[in-house]
Amino acid sequence: MEFRFRRAVRNAIINMMQKRSTRRRRYRSDELMPDEFAAQATPGDEEAIEAFRQLVQDRLGEKAARLLRLRLAGEETKTFVDSGEATSYSVKKSVKAIKLLAREFARSRNDEDFLAMIEKAMAREADTVKRRFGPKVTA
């Protein structure tokens, strides 16, 4: 039994290191990784984050608000799906709605820096999707 435990801990550490390595490869050195970005909050940011959380709850509902809290905590959306609270498709739709609401929120606050960060993140994601699935073919 002790051997199994040691092996499980060893494998968990290896998996964690591989995941960290993969994340570092995916993000350029001049960009912040999501967990590093969350750590760079300034005092006024807490109020803005809370206002955005409330907006998400009001417009998109409790499930989207919980999903946002999960992501702000640095956890993967996969845990939300694995818990049985939602399907991967509903999570994908909620994430898309949250991103559009974030863009609207940044525009309403006249926060050009935040809006630029959102636009850059959405453009990166679009590039990733394009690489993953290729250009759309029309018949």
Image (spheres, helix red, strand yellow):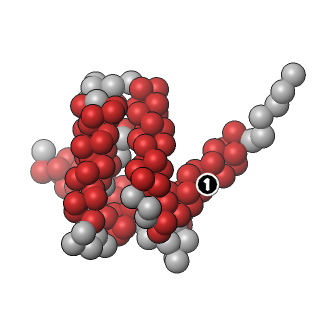
Where in the figure is residue 137, as x and y percent of width and height?
82, 31
Specify the farthest residue to the left. Answer: 2
Q: Is residue 67 visible to the viewer in this orientation of the structure?
A: no
Mark 1 highlights which residue?
123
Question: Residue at horizontal 49%, vertical 60%?
Answer: 115
Where in the figure is residue 1, as x and y percent of width and height?
13, 45
- Quadrant that contains the C terminus: top right
Question: Residue at horizontal 22%, vertical 53%?
Answer: 50
Nearest the eye: 3 or 17 = 17
Q: Give above or below for 19 relative to 25.
A: above
Question: Residue at horizontal 46%, vertical 26%?
Answer: 89
Quadrant in the picture for residue 91: top left
Specify the farthest residue to the right. Answer: 139
Q: Please state the total of marks drawn on the protein image.
A: 1
Left or right, residue 126 beside residue 8? right
The amino acid pointed to by label 1 is Ala
Where in the figure is residue 34, as x and y percent of width and height?
39, 61
Where in the figure is residue 13, as x and y percent of width and height?
29, 60
Left or right, residue 92 beside residue 132? left
Question: Residue at horizontal 48%, vertical 43%?
Answer: 100
